[in-house]
Image: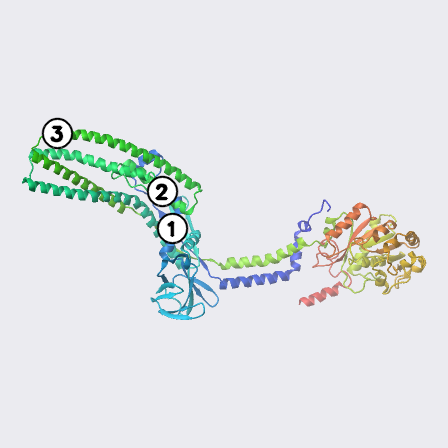
Amino acid sequence: MHPNTERRSAAAPLKYWFTLFLRNWYWFLVSLGGAIFGAIMYQRYTNPVFEIGGAILINSDQKVSTSEQAILSELGYSTLTDVTDQVQYLKSSYLMRRVVDSLDLHISYTQYGRVKVNEQYKPFVFELLEPDLGPALFGRTLRVHTLDPRHFELVGPDGERLSAQFGDTLRHQDIRFVLHPGREPNTDSEYDVTIHSPKQTARRFASSVDVRQVERSNVIAISLVDAVPDRAVALLNTLVEEYNASVLEEKKLAGNNTLVFIDDRLGYIAQELYDVESDVEQYRRDNALPMDMGIQAETYLDKVADVDRQLLEADVQQELLDNLSTYLNSPDQPFPDASALASESLGAIIRQYNELLYKRRHLAEAATERNPAVGSYDEQLGNLRDNIRTSVVNLQRELAGRRRTLEERLRPLERQINAVPRNERELLQIMRQQKIKETLFLFLLQKREETALNIAAQTSDAFLLDEPENRGPVSPGATRVLLFAIVLGMALPAAALFLRDQLDDRLRTRRDVEAHTQIPFLGQVALARTDSPVVVQPESRTAVAEMFRLLRTNLQFNAAGTADQVLLVTSSVSGEGKSFTALNLAVSQSLLGKKTVLVGLDLRKPKVVQYLLGRRGEPGVTHYLLGKAEAEALLQPVPGYDNLYCIDSGPVPPNPSELLQQESIRTLFAWLREHFEYVVVDTAPVGLVTDALLLAPYTDHTLLVARYGMTTQDSLQLLDELYRSGKLVRPGIILNGVRSFGGYGYGRGYGYGYGYGGGYFEGEGKQKKRRIRIKR
């Protein structure tokens, strides 16, 4: 390929594409009409899809005390709710699964109309009485034919029908169920009730819900695009309710763990207190002791009771710390709240740990373990566990020292008690145990109430700012669909024409020729609208005749004073119009008064003389080459043309190439040069046989004929190789059979040819009038 070759479409101006599309206007009209009709049908039979949206506010006020804020600030942790985490949690499949279970969204109801199939939200309620059958139910469908608001029919796979009333318990296909009246269904309508996998249903809705933070505020916008607006409204409302319920459950979990610990201790202490009180009563009765003890014994008991109370609180705290140590080995479990029984600072750390643990769980529902945010939470939770472990060890050490101090205070009091009389001393020891158990019981009872109040005081983090509402249909939008149809209707034929143009490797313009070869371009010839092969007549002024005259002029300029006497006309393959071109070029030369001869040297498929005379001429070139005729005997005058002669090729020989290599062919061309001013030679296609190459040394100019819409770029490449190898004498290309379109030139050769002169040439005015009558 020539180095300057470029795609014709890339170089073509905008006018070319406009002309191409304008010529094929009917395809655009058909495509546009079909697209608009399709858009109307799509609008008519497509179920609309609606957008339902609302907004919620995430409460970031955790009501943290000043001391707790200070503790957490020293540790480098924030006490505010991370709205981004809540967005991820609202989009999680875990939370959506709770919504699906709450609303039974895994059961779908589809109504069949005459044309459309509509999904509806609970026209009646399907209650599955055996919900634990598992995956065996997934994909099962029941056909229900509603008769009236109270009666329906079950339609079996074979068409059998079972009549029933809403509220009846039925068994069908091993499924026990009840259909309850819901929204009043359409009478005489058929519905499909399908059971889906709750897990898959939750994933589908979770991926459809759009949850996003509004700028940098604590407001979260939630929306859902769904074909059933009532279902979408119920889903979003329930999503917020389940979100609040799950958050409250997680907040109360730590307090509930503390209640479990306290309740366990209360049950044990209550039994011990009852036993001790029974012992006191029994001892007084057995020893006939008065109800009032001595003043000294009462004083000792009060002093000892205060120390015992402090020791008991330390024991409870130690037991709670031991319990916390077991939770350190279970990083996925929330810690009990230690602020009521152990330490406020430790309680603040535990609450922060539990809060981060909940956030991590929420994020894990919507992300994988590889998510960087999950890794960040894991790192923070690990640091907090280390802080909790350190605080537990420090508190245990403090409690041990405190117990030693209290035990030292208790020893002198016990010695004083030993000095009391035996009966009072023994009763004092029993009452001391009663006092210890009573104090511990009241202490635990008080902490239990405080913990219960703290649990009850927990509030949800989110409340609705804007209740979910139907914002209208989003699809199909009439304007958008119509615009899309118009664009598609125009784009399809344009794309088809563009692709056809890109994939078309046949020559259609002068630009195509010049893009694929360095051979000089001599001119182009329009497609002849006549049955006669001779289009150049003495008085003719048709476009085709004038183009041959222009070609003749171009050859004269191309000769530039040289002896351009013998013209060899060939082509790459058969059927490209070389004989037609040679014939009319010879006629054109003769009209100048030049003595011209047309020589038929296509020894394989001779036809040029038959085109010109309407018959074969005898004898021919074959006779001359075989020595059976003289050169003068070959000449055939052409009637109507004083200066034009022709020589037929004669009968088809078995060895054309060998005949053309005889010395007599040189003698023939020498005789022709001597007796004629112009010699036009029609020979076999150069792309098929070597005849033209064998005749090249005897010629002055080679005319290569290419055919509009027939000659391929590969064929042109073959001619270009012959040109660059020097096997052809002064070759030039003629583009034959060019068609005229719309006044912009012949074919794609805008700017080249005669297409702009409508009515200028002979006969074109009638054609133009005829076209106008057809349009009318």
Comparing labels 1 and 2, the label whose residue is closer to the camera: 2
Q: Check disc 1: other Cα within 10 Å, few if <14, some if 14-19, many if 20+.
A: many
Q: Residue furthest front?
A: 286
In the picture, measured across the screen, residue 161 lies left or right of residue 709, that is left
Nearest to N terminus: mark 2 or mark 3:
2
Name the amino acid, label 3. Answer: Arg
**Residue 35 coordinates in the image, percent (x, y):** 56, 61
**Residue 405 coordinates in the image, percent (x, y):** 20, 29
**Residue 717 coordinates in the image, percent (x, y):** 75, 49
Cα–Cα span, label 2 and label 3? 51 Å
Q: Is residue 154 above or below residue 134?
A: below
Q: Please tell me whether mark 1 sits on a helix, a strand or a loop.
A: helix
Nearest to N terminus: mark 1 or mark 3:
1
User: Mark on residue 256?
Assistant: none
Report the number of numbered marks.
Answer: 3
Nearest to N terminus: mark 1 or mark 2:
1
Name the amino acid, label 1. Answer: Leu
Q: Is residue 599 above or below residue 280?
A: below
Task: Between residue 309 and residue 688, name the one nearer to us.
Answer: 309
User: Mark on residue 415?
Assistant: 3
Residue identified by numbered label 2: 332
Q: Check disc 2: other Cα within 10 Å, few if <14, some if 14-19, many if 20+.
A: some
Rendered image quadrant of residue 472: bottom left
In contact (CB < 8 Å): disc 1 and disc 3: no
Task: Between residue 337 and residue 26, name the one nearer to us.
Answer: 337
Identity of the residue drawn at 75% across and 52% down: 715
Q: Is residue 15 visible?
A: no
Rendered image quadrant of residue 30: bottom right
In the picture, measured across the screen, residue 33 lies left or right of residue 321, that is right
User: Mark on residue 95?
Assistant: 1
Comparing labels 1 and 3, the label whose residue is closer to the camera: 3
Q: Is residue 446 visible?
A: yes
